[in-house]
Amino acid sequence: MLLITSMTLNLSLLFLFKYFDFLAGSFNELIEHTGSDYKVKLLNLALPVGISFYTFQTMSYTVDVYNRKIKPEKHFGIFSLFVSFFPQLVAGPIERASNLLPQFKKDVFINYDRFASGAQLILWGLIKKVLVADRVGIIANEIFNNHSEYAGFTLIVGVICFAFQIYCDFSGYSDIAIGTARVFGYDLMKNFKSPYFANSLTDFWRRWHISLSTWFKDYIYIPIGGNKVVKWRWYFNLWITFFISGIWHGANWTFVLWGAIHGFGLVIENLLSYKRSDKFQFFKKLWIFSLICLAWIFFRANTITDAFNIVANILTFSEYHISQLSIYVVPVTRGTVFSADFLLTYASIIGLLVVEHQFIIKNRWNLFNHQFKLALCAFATVLIFLFGVFDINEFIYFQF
C-alpha cells in the first residue's frame, strides 16, 4: 500500500505539471471536430525544471526499498541530498540510491587526481556545449523553425546539425555534472558512450542516455516480462517501453511518435536477427546514424505535421535545389560554401568525432603524460573563448 501511495503521488505531480494541459488540449481539439463548444480549461502551470529526472530518481528509490534491494534511508538530510544532489538535479544522470546513498555516508577526501579528472570532464562538457552544440544549433534551429523555405540537401544538413546539437548539449551537461560531482568526491554513473558510433539501434541505446535506458529496463521492461515471454509479447514489451520513453520526454505527440519509431526499429531489428559483424562496419554505422536522424526529425519538429512535411521535402530533389546547393548548405548566412560560419560549424562536428574516436573509444587520452594533457586543456580553453557561442544558455534537457 505504501508503494502504491508513493508511486501515485509521484506520478500525479508529474502528470499535473507536465501532461495535463497536453491531454486537455488534445481532447479539446478532438471534441471541436464534433461541433461541441465544450472545452477543458487548461491549467497553464509553469513546469518545474528537471521534474522528470528527480521524479524518476525518487520512484526508483521507492521500488528498490519495496523490493528490499536497499534499506530505507532513515536520515532525512541524506535522503534529501540524494533527491536534490545539485550536479545532476535538473538533467541527470538519473542516479540509483544503491550507488549514491552509501557515498553520502563516507568521509570525502578531495585529492589532486580526482580534481584533475573532474576538471577535465567539465572542460570536455563545455567544449561540447559551446563549441559544438550551440554552434550547430544555430543552423538546426533556423532550418527546423523555417522548414517550409528549404528542401532536399538543406533539410538533411539541418537534421544532421540537430543530431549533434542534442547529443553535445545533453552529453555536455552530463559530463559537467559527473565532473563536478567528482571534484567534490562523488562518483556518478556514465551517461553516454559515443552513441553515434553504434553498430545497431540496440547498441545505440546502450550508449545513449544510459541512466534513463537502464531505468526503463529495470522498472518497466523487466517487470512486464522483458524477453522472458513468448516472442510476440517480447516485441510488444520492447515497443511499449520505448513508447513510454517517448511520453517521458515531453508533452507533445512528436515525442510520442519518436519513441514509437525507436520501438518499431528495435522490434524489426530483432525480427531480422540483426547481429554485429566486423564486415562493413563503417556502412553499418552510417546506416544506423541515418535511422537515428530520421527519428530525430520527429523529436525536434514543432508539430507532427511539420515532421512529415520535413520528411517529404527531404525527398524533394530538383535541378534547382542541386544548383543552389551552395546556398542550402549555409542557410543561415545565405553565403557560399567557403563562409566562416560554414567552416566552423562542420569543423566542430568533425573535430568532435575525431576526438571521441581517438581519445574515448581508443582511450589514447590516458597514454599522454601530465604536461601534455595540461597543454591540450589550455589549448581547448583558448578555443572555447575564441570560437564558442555564448548567447545560447539553456540546456535542451532542462525542459524535460
Image (spheres, rainbow, N blue to C red):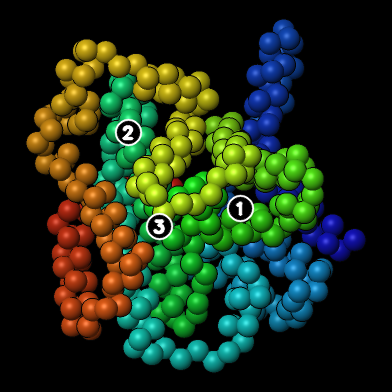
What residue is shown with label 2?
A: 158
Q: Where 277 sits versus 356, above or below?
A: above
Circle nearer the viewer, 1 or 3: 3
Q: Give the CA separation, mark 3 to mark 2.
A: 21 Å
Assign the N terminus to one quadrant of the image.
bottom right
Q: Residue at x 42, y 18 (%)?
A: 312
Q: Secondary structure at mark 2?
A: helix
Can you name the residue that lies furthest to the top here? 35
Badge number at residue 194: 3
Closer to the chain start, of discs 1 and 3, is 1
Circle nearer the viewer, 2 or 1: 2
Describe residue 164's horizontal placement relative to residue 21 as left or right: left
Tell me which amino acid carries mark 2: Gly
Q: Residue at x 59, y 39 (%)?
A: 272
Badge number at residue 52: 1
**Residue 392 percent coordinates (x, y):** 31, 47
Q: Where 24 sits versus 362, above or below?
A: above
Q: Secondary structure at mark 1?
A: helix
Describe residue 153's horizontal placement relative to residue 343 as left or right: right
Q: Where 240 sits versus 371, above or below?
A: above
